[in-house]
Image (cartoon, rainbow, N blue to C red):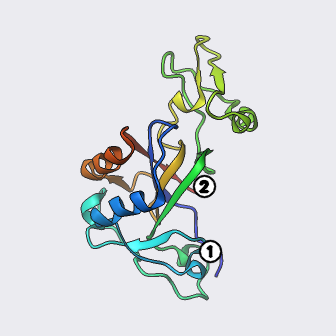
Amino acid sequence: MADIPDNRLILFPRAISARASMSDLLSVLEKTGLIAAELEPETVNGNSDCYTVGDRFFEQISFLGCSPSLKLEPPEPHLKGADAEFCYVSVDCSDEVKFLGGANARPPQCIQCKAVDDDWQLVLPMWRKAPEVFTRQCSGCGATKPLHMFNWRRTAGFAALSVHIWGVHQSEAVPNEGLLKELGALTRCPWEYFYRSSY
């Protein structure tokens, strides 16, 4: 099967220091009804830790506008591109903080003066060497802050722990407050979300 399009709603803890075990995170996702059965890796580009949506998925994720036309089952193996897209959930628990943005990531803004950092991609390699301590100086006001503290305008995030809801396009859906609270209780910090896409 060809690569599944990279359209996702990604949930992540606000604090980059937040950690949880895979079993504890899966327990929360199962309890809230977000996930159900684990998917075979060959149905999701060889990836592990992927799950079908649970029986309370539409209570936890609110789709905006018209009724969504989501495929909830894996497609036939011969389908490609957009025809191979379906809605499922993947989970990432790592010891290392990752930049989770994709092709649609927009230049971040300073949270103080709103200046845009057009050179953000140039500093990502330096950030990756020391993500917990790296800081960036705003070109507008001179304030220095960690890269994750800039306003990424719901197009990127930084975390070691994340929940990916595949098949969701930009601004198509939002997580319900109850789900974010359950995840926040696990990590003892608030959770946020953003949209990642391949365009």
Q: Position of residue 183 (x, y in %)?
A: 35, 49
Front in this rendered view, residue 154 or 199: 154
* Nearer to us in this view, 57 or 7: 57
Above or below 158: residue 113: above
Q: Position of residue 126 (x, y in %)?
A: 75, 33
Q: Is residue 130 left or right of residue 71?
A: right
At label 1, the amino acid type is Asn
Is residue 173 shown above or below 42?
above
| Tag 2 residue | 199
Q: Which residue is mark 1?
A: 45
Cβ–Cβ below 8 Å for labels 2 and 1?
no
Position of the C terminus, as image quadrant, is bottom right
| Residue 130 picture quarter | top right
What is the x, y in percent for residue 123?
A: 72, 32
Q: Amino acid at mark 2?
A: Tyr
* 66 sits to left or right of 47: left
> Residue 198, relative to residue 147: is it above or below?
below
SS at circle 1: loop
Mark 2 or mark 1: whose residue is earlier in sequence? 1
The image position of residue 132, as x and y in percent, is: 61, 32
The N terminus lies in quadrant: bottom right
Report whether 142 appears left or right of 181. right
| Left or right: residue 165 compared with residue 65 | right
- What residue is at 74 percent from the left and 36 percent from the top? 129
Give neighbour class at mark 2: few <14, some 14-19, many 20+ (Cα, 10 Å).
few
